[in-house]
Amino acid sequence: MIRVGVVLTFVALSVSPHAQVTPPTIHTADDSVTCAVTDVPCRDWLQFRQGVVGPYQSFAVATHQGHATVILSEPSVSRADFLPLVDATFSGTVINRSYRRWTTGLDGWLEDLVLDVRLPDTRTVPVISGHDLAAWKAPA
């Protein structure tokens, strides 16, 4: 479910804990990117990019038991300037971070920062966002 806001954009990704995943990897439409079945942040990123294939600066959150995937799509500042801000924002809860590229055209790409973040608190807060102003719950 994609939530587009006037000022901020939220994308809610949901993954059923009972979903059956049979292939060892998940492929994109162009087969240039694959994710191991056990790489949840990569799978969340693929789901985001398959829904938002073009240039789009936003962020998305997918929650899982005890952790969340946070996708910061196409950050506009350099890695050297952006990563300290990300580290300060998540204050030691980042389990893993990676830059992932989505191929566009013959030789272009979109680059996103994908974080696997530990959720020490299970509380959520109601959020209203998106083009339809739908309500959903985000990590507190």
Image (cartoon, rainbow, N blue to C red):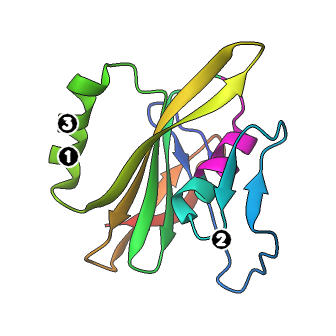
Relative to residue 79, is residue 108 drawn left or right?
right
Measured in 3D between alpha carbons, the distance from the residue under mark 3 to the one under mark 1, in whole angstroms, is 5 Å
Q: Residue at x 72, y 21 (%)?
A: 104
Report the quarter where the N terminus lies.
bottom right
Residue 101: x and y in percent read 58, 32
Name the residue beneath numbered marker 3: 85
Instruction: Compare residues 12 and 50 and report the one nearer the observer.
Output: 50
Residue 112 vs 42, above or below: the answer is: above
Q: Earlier in the sequence, mark 2 or mark 1?
A: 2
Q: Amino acid at mark 2?
A: Val
The quadrant where residue 79 appears: top left
Q: How many other residues sit within 10 Å of disc 3, few (<14), some (14-19) or many (≥20)?
A: few
Q: Earlier in the sequence, mark 3 or mark 2?
A: 2
Q: Amino acid at mark 3?
A: Leu
Report the quarter where the C terminus lies.
bottom left
Measured in 3D between alpha carbons, the distance from the residue under mark 2 to the one under mark 1, in whole angstroms, is 26 Å
**Residue 6 covered by magenta stretch:** no
Q: Residue at x 21, y 24 (%)?
A: 81
Name the residue beneath numbered marker 1: 87
Relative to residue 104, is residue 118 drawn left or right?
left
Secondary structure mostly seen in magenta is helix
Measured in 3D between alpha carbons, the distance from the residue under mark 3 to the one under mark 2, in whole angstroms, is 28 Å
Q: Amino acid at mark 1?
A: Asp
